[in-house]
Amino acid sequence: MRSASVRALLVLLTIAALVAGCGGGGGTSASGGSTSPGGGSTDAGGAGEPQQGGTLSLSLGEEFLGLTPSTAFTLEDVNVESQIFETLFKEDYEGEVVPWLLESYKATKNDTVWTMQLKKGVKFSTGKPMTSADVKWSLERSEEVETLAGIVEGWGKPQAPTPTTVVLTTKKPTPEMPALLSRWGFGVVPQDWGGVSEKQFEEHPIGTGPFEFAKWKKGESLTLKKNVHYWMPQRPYLDEVVYHTVQNPESRTAQVRGGQLDMAESPPFPEVEALEQDPQLAVDSSALGTEWYLILNNEGALFKNPKVREAVNYALDRESMVQLALHGNGEPMNSYLTPSTPSYDSSLAAPEHDAEKAKKLLAEAVQEGAKPTFAISSIAESPFWTQAVQIAQANLEEVGFTVAVKKADLSTVIGEMEEDEFDAAAIMNYGKSSPAELFSFYNATAGSFANVDTKEMEKLLPEAQMETDAAKRDAIYAHMQRIISEEHALISAAYSPFVFARQSDVVGTFIGKTGVLWLGEAGFSG
């Protein structure tokens, strides 16, 4: 059993990361247009100018668990709360992290003191102006969560010397501060929850985003309405956004085809080409931001043997997985980071498929006493592993393994991982604004639940986080990616994009590289 602090981390990181596997990956669908999601007209999400008014009906799949920076656990949750709350920094249409609720910011030469000037005229959906007191309180609240997650360390108490100035001091250089402050967990909320209890706030959240909470029919739908106090002129275009809970991807796609939904996440990959050819519909596909991989539990006797792990690595036919499970919408995975994550090492080669080498390694391991029988726990409705796990099973049995596949719902698979009651798990993760997020998760969970020694990684991570020279920082992160690749405990499979199907008159949507669908400039072309 893991410690209470790691259990809390699971709630904050694992579920948020792994639930996203039911939806795809991260990236950007914007092509040209404005460099900021609030900087004017854009070609993102379709051609044509959005018109004022209308209700957008869409489905992200799963039911929501929470809507605030404290309670948003799944990627579906984060997608909704990102329309209600905003962060000091945000990803722009070019995939760069830029100031958002800030007019400007300045860091000292050693990146330890960050002085930030707040954007003027920003109000909460209640009409109350956002001040440095709200930001200071939000940062203090968020830091507790992010410190537990291992993402931030040694941050001093934020200061608010003027109503429009916030100063954040760290004990060590933090060159990735803008990327960290763009995380959904740092969403700005009113000081002291706006004068209500935290529970009351969770039931009716208040933020500075383009939309505000309207109503929630648990298990059916969640409705947001236009924030009439939004700081960006003439935004949002939409009057309402209604998120419908439709868990089955085939059903979601059928409802887009039938006109019951304007937009839906993760249409089955085999249907993407047909959707693209329908003149009434369109498909938005992001950069490669989702990674699909097998976790081998080194707590068990079988995978303690490095030859067994290496045999699994060589056995997998990743090209077949990409072609059959993703219908070509992806590529073999080569690194623990996604191509959309900063410091991704593109020079790292994807593992080759070599059945003969796998057979030889496994035969040697068997002579050493290994018993090559194990089970793979796989999420039942995963858009990738549903078919790819069958390919993996055939590949592994070809080289001498006996493999069973156990399909279960997400909560069951996560429970097995948490309790170390699994042999192997077919799972996923998605791109981040900072590599520190993924490596912090890796270290805090004994190597993403593979139960490997993370001492070297724990030493390297703070070195990377403090390195102010970008090239040197990339080199440290590249070394960390190679360590994970060479220990063969996380067996990489494939990268894929986020995919959304929509009606052709839906325009101005934007998929960020962390998988968040921004609707602040979305609308209907008329």
Image (cartoon, rainbow, N blue to C red):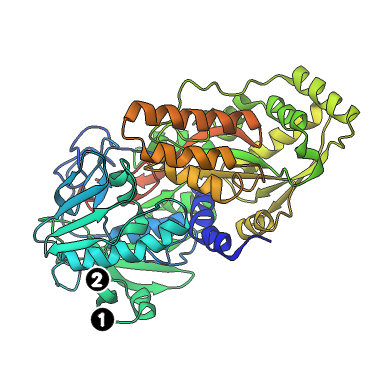
**x and y percent of residue 444 in the render?**
55, 51
User: Which of the numbered marks, if any, corresponds to residue 237?
Assistant: none
Residue at figure coordinates x 81%, y 20% from the top left? 360
Amino acid at dot 1? Gly
Residue at figure coordinates x 40%, y 46% from the top left? 515
With respect to residue 411, does 437 lie above or below? above
Q: What distance separates the C-alpha of mark 2 from that of mark 1? A: 8 Å
Residue at figure coordinates x 77%, y 31% from the top left? 308
**x and y percent of residue 122 in the render?**
14, 61
Q: Residues within 10 Å of mark 2 (few under 14, many from 20)?
A: many
Figure quadrant of the N terminus: bottom right
Foreground of the two, 219 or 35: 35
Q: Mark 1 points at which residue?
A: 195
Q: Which of marks 2 and 1 is nearer the N terminus?
A: 2
User: Which of the numbered marks, if any, corresponds to residue 190?
Assistant: 2
Q: Do the residues labelled 2 and 1 touch (CB within 8 Å)?
A: yes
Amino acid at dot 2? Pro
Q: Does residue 35 show up?
A: yes
Foreground of the two, 176 or 460: 460
Q: Does residue 268 show up?
A: no
With respect to residue 329, does 499 lie above or below? below
**x and y percent of residue 41 in the render?**
15, 42
With respect to residue 407, does 160 lie above or below? below
Which picture quadrant has residue 304? top right
Q: How crowded is mark 1: few (under 14 residues within 10 Å), some or many (20 or more)?
A: few
